[in-house]
Structures are given as C-alpha cells and as structure tokens.
Image (cartoon, grey):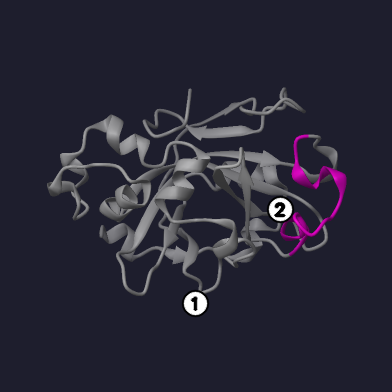
Amino acid sequence: MSETIKNARLMPRIFFDRRPQIVARQLLGKLLVRREDNGPLVAGRIVETEAYLGADDAAAHSAAGRTQRTAVIFGPSGHAYVYFTYGMHYCMNVSCEPEGRAGCVLLRALEPIAGIGQMARNRKMQIPRSARNDNAASLDERTLRLLCAGPARLCQALGIDRPRDNGKDLLTPDSDLQLWDDGYPVKKIVATTRVGITKSADLPLRFYISGSAYISRK
C-alpha cells in the first residue's frame, strides 16, 4: 500500500451535507475503500461521478418521492444507496444533503489503487500472476482500466451489492466500506451531460478528472 493511502483520513459528514452537484465535483480524487477482516484492503480513486438532484430531477430515483427503496437518499448524508439495474448489475450512489432532503452522487469510475488482485478475482478477470500482489505495473492500461471503468464494474471490483451494502454508513471507523481523503490534487475537471439516461439527459451533471485513463467514456 502506498504511503499516501496509509496517511489518508476518513471523510467528514459535513462534506456531504451539500448539493449533489457540488459534492460530485469535489468527490473526484477521493478514495473508495473496502476493508475486509480476512482479505486485502481494496481501494480505488474516484475519477468519474454523476449528480442526481432529487425531486427536481426527473432522472433521479427520488423524483417520485420517498419510498422503501429510496429511503437512503432521503436519510443522513454519507450513506451508500445501492440499486440493481438491468436485472444483472449493482450501482452505488452516496447520499447528499441534510437528512430529509433527497440528493445523491453516482460513482461511475475508479482508478485502481490497492487490492488489484482481489479486484480481478471479484470481476472474474484473468490477470498475470505477477499482478496478483498489487503489481499494477505488470498490467497493460486496458486491463487495469476495465477493473473499475463503469458503475457496475466498480461495484463488482469492490464486492458491492444491495443486500450487503445498501444503507451502509461510509463515514464511520467500523464500516467495511468507507470514503477516504488522501489529499490527492485534482487539477482539472470536465463537466458533461449524463450518460445512459433519457430523462433530464441534457443537464451537465457528469464530472470526471481531465486526462484520466480510467473513466467509463470520454
């Protein structure tokens, strides 16, 4: 594990008590971390996000109001909202806004940082033996990118699913799924319209780190 990750700190809740479009931009460069008792630490740097605005956003799950499914989005900030899509994939959002107000940020892509061998096993990808102990240098860029480029892929890579993780607090020390800040400097952010949706598709609420090789699409 790199020294920068060792020195990372758990993110504060106040960071997420804001509008999703602000959180989505400033969440870029932070770390999503899975901590297993009997396995390696698995971590990826967030390089692509999408904001969903709640009641005023027709593409948001919360647009129709609070339901049993969307209760996490209306709850305290900094919790995982995990949903199942296309009958085969999980996607993960982070709840934003103070409790009672809906808003969330979809995590769309990560740059693999730690636990690369475990990510590959979770994704059922074949990688060289030399890469199974976190030696990213032995992987070509395309293979490394495919580990976490896309909301479904990153959930697979970190073993995220709805039964296990929906509603989980990402900001407490005893959680096995957390968000960390290691002070990584993000120099330039690109804003585009969101992808894979039909409602409110023209809103510029997708953000990614300029020049990153790990985003889901340009």
The residue type indicated by label 1 comes to: Asp
- Residue positioned 33% across, 46% down in the render: 124
Residue 213 vertical placement versus 202 (above, below):
below
Q: Look at the image and say whether residue 63 sits in the magenta stretch.
A: yes
- Sequence-wise, the earlier of marks 2 and 1 is 2
Tag 2 residue: 18
User: How many other residues sit within 10 Å of disc 2, few (<14), some (14-19) or many (≥20)?
Assistant: some
Instruction: Single out the residue that lies furthest toward the front.
Output: 87
Alpha carbons under labels 2 and 1: distance apart: 24 Å
- Residue positioned 35% across, 58% down in the render: 42
Residue 31 in the image: state x and y as whole percent. Answer: 44, 54
- Range of the magenta residues? 59-75
| Quadrant location of the N terminus in the rendered image | bottom left
Q: Is mark 2 on a helix, strand or loop?
A: loop
Q: Which mark identifies residue 174?
A: 1
Residue 18 in the image: state x and y as whole percent. Answer: 71, 53
Q: Which mark identifies residue 9?
A: none
The residue type indicated by label 2 comes to: Arg
